Image (cartoon, grey):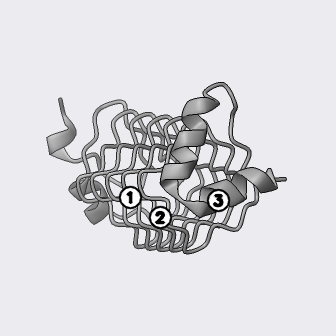
Amino acid sequence: MADKEQVARLRTSAGAWNGWRAKNPKKRPDLRGADLRYADLRRADLRRAHLGESDLSRANLSEALLGGADLTRAVLIEADLVGADLSRAVLTRAALVGTYLLGADLRGADLNVTDLRGADLRGADLRGADLTHSFFLIQAQVEAAMGDLDTKLPPSVIRPAHWAG
């Protein structure tokens, strides 16, 4: 269950949230199950945050710092994650339907059993990410992203030639 004070602080403004994070660097945010639909979280520092089962539908998370965050079963339908840092984030069983991930850093992220239907992955960095059992990932999405030989893909998708090295 989410810490209600933390949710209220985050909803106030990303600036106020980031100030609180700077003063409490060892505290891991607990935002599990929070209703953050339509929230303006641009540039919010959500590194290592517990966001499992949160609803972030249509939230603006552009340029947000989500490295190492737990987004297991989170709902990010049509969320804006343009330029966000999701490196090493856990997105297992998350719903990324129609999510904007243009230029997002997903290096080493766990996207197993994640619904990527209509997600925009143009310029997203998938190096070392695990998409082995992701749903609705199509070739065009993969072709538009960056990856490498360590990126794990479902068998229905062919590793693009530009990922070779």
Q: Amino acid at mark 1?
A: Ser
Camera-side residue of 47 and 9 = 9
Task: Identify the secondary structure beneath mark 3.
Answer: loop
On screen, residue 130 versus residue 50, left or right, reads left
Q: Is residue 75 left or right of residue 138?
A: right
Residue 139 spot, x, y in % from top left = 30, 61
Res 90 quadrant in image: top right
Compare residues 132 and 85 and report the one nearer the observer.
85
Q: Is residue 165 above or below residue 52?
A: above
> Could you tell me which residue is drawn at 37 percent across and 37 percent down?
151
**Amino acid at circle 3:** Ala
The residue that disc 1 covers is 62
Foreground residue among 114 and 125: 125
Residue denoted by label 3? 74
Q: Amino acid at mark 2?
A: Leu
Q: Secondary structure at mark 2?
A: loop
Q: Position of residue 94 (x, y in %)?
A: 61, 58
Q: Residue drawn at (69%, 41%), measured in percent from left and top?
A: 29
Rendering coords of residue 67 (x, y %): 49, 37
Instruction: Establish if 123 lies above or below 98.
Output: above
Question: Which element carries disc 1, helix, strand or loop?
Answer: loop
Q: Residue at x 55, y 50 (%)?
A: 16
Q: Could you give the CA–CA distance between mark 1 and mark 3, rounded to whole angstroms?
A: 17 Å
Give the residue pinned by disc 2.
116
Q: CA distance from mark 3 to mark 2?
A: 13 Å
| Mark 3 or mark 2: whose residue is earlier in sequence | 3
The image quarter containing residue 80 is bottom left
How far across and how far down the image is residue 84, in percent? 38, 50
Label 1 or label 3, whichever comes before in sequence order:
1
Q: Earlier in the sequence, mark 1 or mark 2?
A: 1
